[in-house]
Amino acid sequence: MRDVIHFSLAAFGTLTVFATAYPALADTVEERRAKGAAVVSKLNNGVAQNNLENMRREFPFLAEATEAYALGDVWSRPGLDDRTRQLAAVATFAAMGMTDLMTVHARYALNIGVTEDELKEIVYMITVPAGFPRAIIASQALSKVFAERAPAICSVDTCESGTTTTP
């Protein structure tokens, strides 16, 4: 019994220290969600994030947790600037083979000034820990992101993308 009480007090002490060390966790859920929404707004040029909004309709708890914890608590912490956070996210998701999430963060990275060449370097870097197959898949996904952001070069009849323009 004495060990249980000692463990409980130790756990309480750890919890108290944790809450003190990370004051963001002491905020209300609404405050944390507001911080998360501000992060998305800043990274996505003021536009709502489609994946998050779709999740909010079908999986509201997961959307709330993503917005309040991942974005409000973690992403809004001091210590790393937005560029570093986005490069880390792109590298992590690329190495894990999660290209859907990688492209979300690649778009954010481009929105805040990361260059295409820097994102390409991330793909080269992941060949070491994650292997060539993951890097190739990431490069293909990034190529699509780059293409969607590239201005179309059009003549009177056609655009480089192969679509025909209207007169």
Image (cartoon, rainbow, N blue to C red):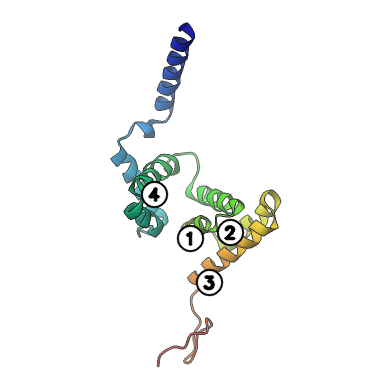
The image quadrant where one finds the N terminus is: top left
Which residue is drawn at the image coordinates 40% and 93% (left, top)? 167
Where does label 2 land, which residue?
Answer: 119
Within 10 Å of disc 3 (Cα), the crowding (few <14, some 14-19, many 20+) is few
Q: Earlier in the sequence, mark 4 or mark 3?
A: 4
Q: Does the CB distance between marks 2 and 4 fall below 8 Å?
A: no
**Where does the image place residue 140, in percent across and percent down from the top left?**
60, 66
Which residue is drawn at the image coordinates 36% and 57% (left, top)? 54
**Where does the image place residue 63, in percent across and percent down from the top left?**
37, 48
Question: Label 3 is placed on what type of residue?
Answer: Ala
Distance of label 4 from label 3 (alpha carbons): 25 Å
Where does label 4 land, which residue?
Answer: 39
Where does label 1 land, which residue?
Answer: 107
Residue 147 — which label? Answer: 3
Distance of label 1 from label 3 (alpha carbons): 12 Å
Distance of label 1 from label 4 (alpha carbons): 14 Å
Q: Earlier in the sequence, mark 1 or mark 4?
A: 4
SS for dot 1: helix
